[in-house]
Amino acid sequence: MLTKRRTVMAAALAAACLAQPARAEDVIKMGGLATLEGAFTVLGQDGLRGMKLALQEVNYTVAGKKIVVTYGSSDATPDSAVKAARKLVEQDGDQILIGPLSGSEGIAIKDYAKTQPNVTFLNGSSAAQDTTLYSPAPNFFRFSTDGVQWMAGLGEYVYKVKGYHTVATVAEDYSFPYSQVEGFMLPFCKLGGHVTAKFWVPIGNKDYSSVIAALPDDVDAVYVALGGADAINFLTQYQQSGGKAHLIGGSITVDQTVLGSKGTIRNAVIGTPAAGPTADTWDDPRWKAFTAEYRKAFPDGFPVPSLFAHAYYVNTKAALLALAKVNGDLSDGGKKYREVLSTLSFDTPTGPVKLDHNRNGIADIFVTEVTEGKGGVLLNKVIKVVDNVNQTLGEPEAEFLKIGHPSRDNPSCK
């Protein structure tokens, strides 16, 4: 009888042990921050698909430790991003944070990172140049490159091949489009191109009639750096107004988050040259495998992963690879982990990536044109691959810094 009672007690004790939550040292806490409110909601949703895809590949486990993920939402404003990050870090106790999505959010999170030296921050898809080139945070890493880099090769292509020598620009009025316009203008103007007018609009603008009416008639093309609902609204209204000028796309203007929308923008965007960190038709086994994995995991996603899914995937992949190298040990406040991240290089779905001394990615960039694929799907066709693009577009950093921060008025060429 005593033996029977002991057996029952042992079984109960074992069951209780199994029911207990994992010990703190057996868990790694990770946060995911994306814009899930406002004009960029669709972008944020696909960004998190990329993050989840990287985590699914390792079954949310590294070095025998379970990765517990909490998510935070912003609306593309710096204040909302910092508020969400504070909750993830200071309330939820996340040791690693992936995000944010949008440009000015990234600058704000970089500054917040400086107040949390024992937390490691990896970018989502935020691509303002200022985040890492000016006053970088030692615990903020961006493997996904920036908006200036994303324009590599485009200014030369439209000037030399397309024959566009005079351009007007339409872009959202914040740090990421400033970077995109700079990345386009620097080589374009150097070759002799002219940007004769710039139009800046707030995020979430719905009526573009006054901007479209004010576009000059004597330009070869209009460079558009708008994203999400903003891009869809402008392109739809531009087409409806009978706009005739050729279009040049910023990276997120012809991304799948726009091309995959259900609307009438098709005729406006087919043939549009652009550039960015991904190219839908790239015939490379790494990209094809990534696309197939994305489609299988997210049948409700886009026909091809957006650049936001790609960026969040790459940064999350970097986080996981470095965790494996330190055997999941963050007990020193992540110091060794960040040392590993700083020297990490690996193969991504779009080629190799490594970091510069500002902890910003150096990677390949694609010049593309919008084309129609099977079933009428709009895709970015590869025109050219620009290898190993760094943050200063190949210029010595000291010389590049003399250009100054990208802004509404800088750079300029007439």
Image: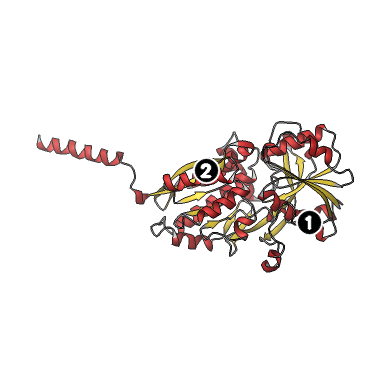
Q: Residue at x 51, y 54 (%)?
A: 113
Q: State whether residue 356 is above or below residue 109.
A: below
Q: How is the image coloured?
A: secondary structure
The front one of 108 and 307 is 108
From the top left corner, tell me how far across and down residue 390 is, in percent.
66, 61
From the top left corner, tell me how far across and down residue 57 is, in percent.
50, 46
Residue 182: which quarter of the image?
Answer: bottom right
Dot 2 lies on which element?
A: helix
From the top left corner, tell me how far across and down residue 83 is, in percent.
51, 44
Per the image, the residue denoted by label 1 is: 412
Q: Is residue 289 visible to us here?
A: no
Q: Quadrant of the N terminus?
A: top left
> Disc 2 versus disc 1: distance between alpha carbons?
41 Å
- The local crowd at label 1, few if under 14, some if 14 to 19, many if 20 or more residues have their Cα within 10 Å, is some
Q: Residue at x 77, y 55 (%)?
A: 185
Q: Is residue 197 visible to us here?
A: yes
Q: Do labels 2 and 1 touch, CB within 8 Å?
A: no
Tag of residue 213: none
The front one of 376 and 88 is 88
Q: Amino acid at mark 2?
A: Lys
- Mark toward the viewer: 2 or 1: 1
Q: Earlier in the sequence, mark 2 or mark 1?
A: 2
Per the image, the residue denoted by label 2 is: 52
Residue lying at the far left in this picture: please name it.
1
The front one of 349 and 199 is 199
Q: State whether residue 410 is above or below residue 80.
A: below
Dot 1 lies on which element?
A: loop
Q: Amino acid at mark 1?
A: Ser
From the top left corner, tell me how far across and down residue 160 is, in percent.
85, 56
Left or right: 344, with 28 as reference point: right
- The local crowd at label 2, few if under 14, some if 14 to 19, many if 20 or more residues have their Cα within 10 Å, is many
